[in-house]
Image (cartoon, rainbow, N blue to C red):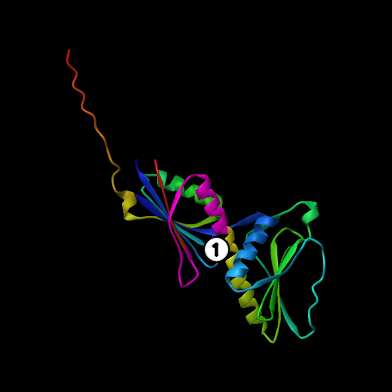
């Protein structure tokens, strides 16, 4: 199972800083949408270096024998 | 992979949820609730009192006809803050107090209204995290009154 993590900081004025971890590729941005709907307006957004790491790729080798 | 974003809060709430956030915020800052009413009334203000009117940006208090004049007042050290719903639905607050400058009343009003929004956002996030079955693994308030929450989920 993949672990997803959200680090949420709610400032004393109600502004929220959200760090989304453990999502692959653009699903990270989709996870942010949930919080955007809950909290309010998106003011800024940036991808961390992890965002640009290659996604895990699983390859299956199939030997066909007739 | 990860990403970071900053979100500015929008408060869209029915009066019960908003007043619950007011009570939680006011209590955390040492205020006491002095009145909560759903009838229109004018709060008596001493002639030598300062008075500052503020509102909460990006707020909308959703209410039915019966709850149109709801308000709640809290007090601390001679300063009284009354929250209400203004005619266009925005959350408004009136800060009154004797012996304090308008700047000081404004500062106290902004501190409390910010804290109300913080508690509203906190309640909303926590309800949704629990509804989705996410696990809150850490929660703390730092010296700057920011609330830090770490939430995990697995799939």
Residue with the mark numbered 1: A14
The quarter of the rendered structure image containing the C terminus of chain B is: top left
| Left/right of residue A1 with respect to residue A43 in the rendered view | left
Magenta-drawn segment: B121-147
Residue B74 position by quadrant: bottom right
The image shows residue B143 at horizontal and vertical percentages of 46, 73
Looking at the image, residue A63 lies above or below residue A9: above
Position of B2 with respect to B113 (left or right) is left
Indicate left or right for B64 with B104 as reference.
right
Rendering coords of residue A10 (x, y %) = 50, 62
Q: Is residue B57 visible?
A: no
Residue positioned 50% across, 44% down in the render: B132
Considering depth in this image, is B33 or A48 the residue closer to the camera?
B33
Give the left or right position of residue B75, taking residue B152 as reference: right
Q: Position of residue B94 (x, y in %)?
A: 71, 72
Compare residues B84 and B143 and report the one nearer the observer: B143
Point 81% across, 62% down: residue:
B39
Where B50 sits versus B14, above or below? below
């Amino acid at each position: 199972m993949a672990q997803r993590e959200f680090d949420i900081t709610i400032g004393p004025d109600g502004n929220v800083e959200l760090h989304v971890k453990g999502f692959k590729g653009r699903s990270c941005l989709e996870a942010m949408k949930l919080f955007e709907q809950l909290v309010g307006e998106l003011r800024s957004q940036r991808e961390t270096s992890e965002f640009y790491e290659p996604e895990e790729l699983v390859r299956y080798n199939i030997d066909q024998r007739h | 992979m990860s990403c970071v974003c900053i979100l500015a809060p929008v408060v869209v709430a029915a009066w019960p949820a908003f007043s619950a956030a007011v009570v939680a915020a006011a209590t955390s800052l040492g205020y006491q609730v002095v009145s909560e009413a759903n009838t229109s009334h004018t709060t008596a203000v001493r002639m030598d009192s300062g008075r500052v009117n503020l509102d909460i940006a990006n707020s909308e208090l959703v209410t039915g006809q019966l709850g149109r004049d709801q308000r709640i007042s809290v007090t601390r050290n001679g300063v009284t803050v009354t929250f209400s719903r203004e005619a266009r639905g925005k959350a408004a607050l009136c800060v009154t107090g004797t012996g304090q400058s308008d700047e000081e009343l404004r500062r106290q009003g902004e501190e409390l209204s910010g804290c109300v929004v913080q508690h509203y956002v906190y309640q909303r996030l926590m309800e949704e995290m629990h509804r989705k079955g996410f696990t809150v693994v850490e929660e703390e308030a730092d010296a700057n009154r920011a609330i830090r929450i770490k939430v995990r989920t697995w799939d």
